[in-house]
Image (tube, rainbow, N blue to C red):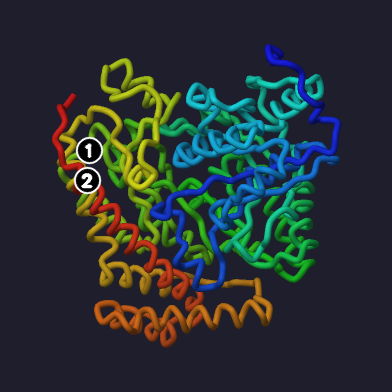
């Protein structure tokens, strides 16, 4: 909708508009911001800003674009002086950075445009922005551009319609420096067929997975290939196998493309645990060279999952499912959540046992957070248990993500008991002895069949990273025995699992530091709150 209460401005749409896209910084304490590991191989941040690259592809071709990822590069006043428009946005953990940027943009006399998951979920918090382009950009960016063409100075753009993924634009990968990142992103689908009470994916993208065509995915891979990128590509889908039929079709196409081009990439993704019972998809993923898959387990207790509508649906124990996936060459990473209503005093011990039994090394353990517009939030509001409306990031040093800022409601169990259990889980799973035991187990069970072969230059970088990692471990007496026992054990028993083993060993640098930060942060919050 157009707002023409101010005097008309220059037609930014028609002219040689200079548009600055800014990807706000994530906290260095975030589970996903493993900067120390990045620096081992000369990178600056794990993941490229796929959302910004996708938005950039929707903008007029005659615009001049510049992208600044604050996770990699400092935003300078000169960048803002250069721009006519500044586009930004992101997720809840980036909220404070986005709001600060809007103020900074206005101080330079420029217009600020926001979008992304958090502005879409709670646009009222971003009222200071000149334009709010909400929902899926493929639908609302054209509405905004049309108003901009007519001289709009402010506006809010939202639509109930969902994007036709078959007509999605190829992201502007040319706007970034590949060397800044550990991996590139690609998106096959949006939406999830499940109905987990606490998840906002279905609120943002719907319960009917919408997918790109195989030809479109190959075009995106081809674009990365033509730009010279080689290595790790992450399918960022919230559930790659949400639509199994189409997932199989695109994986078949990717398998043939990989064979044709000599396996320039290897892949990771996120999927539901029932992947373990789909032999066809597992074989296709193995043949495409998928090496990592993140699975939201959330809780090892069936009663907890049932009440929150989380369906593991693996028809096997979690440990058996993880072993099955590992037998196809994929390392399983997983998410766990504490703070559900029907947890028990056994939850912490059960969670630790699950993580140890499965050998899951990279376990993201957080506390339950009632995100805006989810079924969980609506239920808690009806029960009078929400501590505040909306989600506000007040302190970027402590409100990092759900690993530090959960339990924004009156809990069923005593809050102090949940937090103490949470600390006990983190203390256990990221103790060096326990972590490296899981690394050995994963390496021994993994049937690694990596088809991607790194270039000579990439191999040299990896070798030098291994030297630095080994030095880091060796000079730490409490760490060195576990590290070297793990490396030598795999060299002797399962050398084909060594690459995955070294990668997981490197990740310990981040997880140990991050878990120490969380434990210190959470321990300060051991203040009892009333039970429901």
The secondary element bearing badge 2 is classed as helix
Q: Quadrant of residue 434?
A: bottom left
The secondary element bearing badge 1 is classed as loop
Q: Is residue 338 left or right of residue 321?
A: left
Few, some or many residues within 10 Å of mark 2 (<14, 14–19, 20+): many
Look at the picture and state if 526 lies above or below 257.
above
Residue at position x 51%, y 50% from top?
275
Residue at position x 68%, y 39% from top?
211
Q: Are marks 2 and 1 in contact (CB under 8 Å)?
A: yes
Residue 68, position as x, y percentages in the image: 63, 50
Residue at image mark 2: 347
Residue 457, position as x, y percentages in the image: 66, 80
Residue at position x 34%, y 68% from top?
438
Q: Quadrant of residue 507?
A: bottom left
Viewer-side residue, 247 vs 220: 220
Q: Is residue 269 left or right of residue 356?
A: right
Disc 2 from disc 1: Cα separation: 6 Å
| Residue closest to the far top | 5
Residue at image mark 1: 343
Residue 62, position as x, y percentages in the image: 85, 40
Look at the picture and state if 353 lies above or below 126.
below
Regarding residue 253, the answer to whether it shows in the image is no
Few, some or many residues within 10 Å of mark 1 (<14, 14–19, 20+): some
Residue 251, position as x, y percentages in the image: 67, 53
* Quadrant occupied by the N terminus: top right
Viewer-side residue, 334 vs 159: 159
Residue at position x 81%, y 37% from top?
60
Viewer-side residue, 250 vs 117: 117
């Amino acid at each position: 909708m157009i707002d023409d209460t101010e005097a008309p401005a220059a037609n930014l749409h028609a002219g040689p508009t200079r548009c600055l896209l800014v990807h706000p910084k994530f906290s260095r304490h975030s589970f996903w911001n493993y900067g120390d590991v990045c620096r081992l191989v000369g990178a600056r941040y794990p993941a490229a800003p796929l959302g910004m690259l996708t938005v950039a592809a929707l903008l007029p071709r005659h615009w001049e674009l510049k992208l600044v990822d604050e996770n990699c590069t400092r935003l300078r006043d000169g960048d803002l002086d250069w721009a006519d428009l500044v586009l930004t946005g992101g997720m809840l953990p980036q909220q404070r950075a986005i709001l600060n940027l809007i103020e900074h943009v206005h101080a330079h006399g420029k217009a600020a445009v926001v979008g992304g998951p958090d502005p879409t979920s709670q646009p009222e918090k971003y009222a200071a922005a000149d334009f709010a382009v909400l929902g899926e950009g493929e639908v609302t960016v054209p509405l905004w551009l049309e108003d901009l063409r007519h001289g709009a100075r402010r506006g809010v753009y939202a639509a109930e319609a969902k994007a036709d993924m078959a007509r999605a634009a190829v992201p502007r990968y040319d706007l970034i420096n590949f060397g800044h990142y550990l991996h590139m992103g690609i998106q096959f689908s949006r939406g999830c067929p499940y109905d987990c009470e606490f998840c906002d994916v279905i609120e943002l993208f719907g319960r009917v997975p919408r997918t790109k065509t195989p030809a479109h995915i190959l075009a995106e891979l081809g674009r990365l290939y033509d730009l010279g990128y080689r290595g790790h590509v992450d399918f960022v889908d919230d559930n790659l196998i949400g639509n199994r039929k189409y997932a199989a079709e695109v994986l078949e196409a990717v398998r043939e493309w990989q064979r044709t081009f000599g396996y320039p990439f290897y892949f990771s993704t996120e999927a539901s645990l029932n992947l373990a019972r789909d032999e066809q998809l597992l074989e296709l993923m193995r043949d495409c060279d998928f090496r990592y898959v993140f699975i939201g387990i959330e809780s090892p207790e069936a009663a907890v999952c049932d009440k929150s509508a989380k369906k593991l649906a693996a028809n096997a124990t979690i440990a058996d499912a993880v072993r099955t996936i590992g037998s196809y060459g994929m390392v399983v990473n997983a998410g766990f959540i504490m703070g559900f209503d029907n947890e028990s005093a056994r939850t912490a011990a059960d969670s630790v046992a699950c993580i140890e039994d499965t050998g899951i090394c990279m376990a993201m353990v957080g506390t339950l957070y009632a995100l805006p517009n989810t079924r969980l939030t609506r239920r808690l509001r009806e029960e009078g248990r929400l501590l505040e409306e909306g989600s506000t990031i007040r302190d970027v040093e402590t409100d990092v993500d759900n690993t530090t800022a959960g339990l924004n409601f009156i809990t069923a169990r005593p809050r102090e008991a949940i937090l103490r259990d949470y600390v006990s889980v983190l203390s256990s799973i990221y103790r060096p002895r326990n972590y490296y035991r899981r690394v050995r187990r994963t390496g021994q069970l993994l049937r690694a069949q990596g088809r991607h072969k790194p270039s000579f230059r990439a191999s040299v970088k990896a070798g030098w990273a291994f030297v630095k990692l080994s030095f880091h471990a060796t000079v730490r007496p409490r760490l060195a025995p576990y590290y070297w026992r793990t490396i030598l054990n795999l060299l002797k028993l399962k050398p084909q699992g060594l690459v995955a083993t070294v990668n997981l060993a490197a990740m310990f640098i981040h997880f140990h530091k991050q878990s120490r930060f969380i434990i210190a942060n959470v321990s300060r919050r051991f203040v009892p709150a009333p039970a429901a």
